[in-house]
Image (cartoon, rainbow, N blue to C red):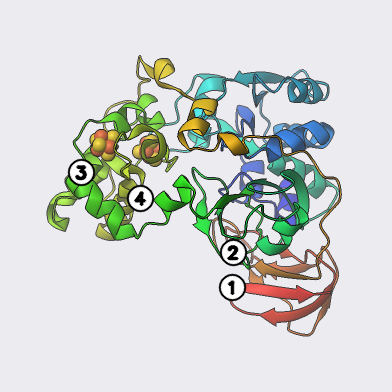
Amino acid sequence: MQLQDKIFIAGVVGAGGAGFPAHVKAKSKVEFVLANGAECEPLIHKDYELMLHFPKEIARGFDLLIESTSAKKGFFGIKEKNIKVISAISEHLNGKTELTKLGDFYPSGDEFELVYEATKRLIPPAGIPLDVGCVVNNVETLYNIALAEDEIPVTKKFICVAGAIKKPSSFFVPVGTSFKDVIEFAGGPKLSEFGIFVGGVMMGHLTFDLNEVVTKTTAGIIVLPKDHYLIKRKNQPEQNWHRIGKSACDQCSYCTEFCPRYLLGYQVEPHKVMRSLGFTKTGASVWNQMAELCCSCGLCTLYACPEDLYPKEACDKAKVEMREAGIKFVQQKEAKVHPIKEGRRVPLPQLIMKLKLQDYDVEAPFNSKILSVNNVKIPLQQHIGKSAKAIVRKGEAVEEGQMIGKIPGDVLGANIHASIKGKVSEVTSECISIES
Ligand code: SF4
Ligand code: SF4
């Protein structure tokens, strides 16, 4: 069986956050394959720990992908500061692969940034790495590809639990495990009133619901006191973000000047999008178009704006309005890297200070014990594409690794597998619950 078919059966998706089905990338033909080990979300260290403890498996997944795509070369992106990881990974890389050493900046893990750093090619506006002969995979995806080659499906997720937690750490958990169980496994919270950033403080979402579950794309969870600056900022009603922005934005354009996509040469100009807040819907689209190529990295809102406004959220809103109105912005001018790009990069330690996270900026060492739970709730949609269709019924006994949600034929999506052995206790159109 070909690698792409094994990956499809095993339900491997991009583990870095996007959840793009990995078999699609494995069947493409490209010049370069890139491994993304840049990890730049503050406090999250799961890729670092995975590369340190499983370099052989990651390098194997990488080699398999280079072979299946007929790539002539691989680039492995790692931060230059991670000396121990560079040494662990280097031992297993073959002659076709070059290390791309990256600075400690945010967002060095953005694939537009990584492709440019490694190959000096710019992905066309609104394009994908494939447009410039590349595919990019997060290191955990490569680890899962190595398992898929041995016909082991994705049933566990490697996550980092950090912040106001007694034992910040990184470990494997069964997909579908509740945040409550995960937080307890990391020693419990340091306080009774807290919120949780899922996937990171910059690009993740905020929740107070301990029954939310880990999916194939959960990179980590950051626990913070309920009165922390970031929770207070994020927990404002959405209309406040835009109402305050409408009256207080003085068009200083710092949000645009620090925008990593703007600095790469794309027409992303959040200060112009802020203008749209003061317009009626008929006039707003003129400015909203400057949001189309925004990657929602959050830097404008959480770092650049001197007035603590919400330009990223204005861009998110603009993108939705543009989609609803059927307007698609097409950048006419060629993307060209801004001459000041290097001087405007945001060092991670500086970002951590700005976010008031310095007290939580500690290591999250690997805990080799696998969290064992007696119930999981596994979403059928953990990926880009169509939702998987349940193929088990309530009351049915399932084995760990058994396929329980299937994607038919040529449809874009990913299969879902039981993450623990037990009995199916509930099946809905959205998830399958299993109790052991
Ligand atoms: S940085 Fe803040 S105040 Fe300045 S233009 Fe952007 S949103 Fe407005
Ligand atoms: S979130 Fe802000 S800084 Fe990031 S890409 Fe979008 S506009 Fe640029």
Q: Position of residue 23 (x, y in %)?
A: 66, 48
Relative horizontal placement of residue 151, taking residue 134 as reference (left or right): right
Q: Which residue is mark 2?
A: 381
Mark in front: 2 vs 4: 4
Where residue 208 sits: x, y (%)?
54, 62
Residue type, label 1: Glu
Residue that mark 1 sits on: 430
Indicate which disc, 3 or 4, sits on the residue closer to the N terminus. Answer: 3
Check disc 1 and report its element: helix, strand or loop: loop
Q: Quadrant of residue 287?
A: top left
Mark 3 belongs to which amino acid? Ala
Q: Secondary structure at mark 4?
A: helix
Q: Are marks 2 and 1 in contact (CB under 8 Å)?
A: yes
Q: Helix, strand, or loop for circle 3?
A: helix
Q: In the image, which is nearer the foreground, mark 3 or mark 4?
A: 3
Question: What mark, if any, has residue 248 been given in the picture?
Answer: 3
Q: Residues under labels 2 and 1: Cα distance? A: 7 Å
* Residue with the mark numbered 4: 316
Q: How packed is label 3: few (under 14 Cα within 10 Å), some, or many (20 or more)?
A: few
Q: CA distance from mark 3 to mark 1?
A: 41 Å
- Whether the residue carrying mark 3 lies under 8 Å from ligand 1 is answered with yes
Give whichever of 377, 2 is nearer the camera.
377
Disc with the residue nearer the chain's start (2 vs 4)? 4
Q: Is residue 343 above or below residue 71?
A: above
Tell me which corner region of the image, top left, top right, bottom left or bottom right, holds residue 191.
bottom right
The amino acid beneath tag 4 is: Asp
Please tell me how crowded label 4 is: few (under 14), some (14-19), or many (20+) other residues with Cα within 10 Å. Answer: some
Q: If you read the primary sequence from the N terminus, does the residue marked by circle 3 or circle 2 appear first? A: 3
Q: Nearer the viewer, mark 3 or mark 1?
A: 3
Whichever of callouts 3 and 1 sits on the residue coming sooner in the sequence is: 3
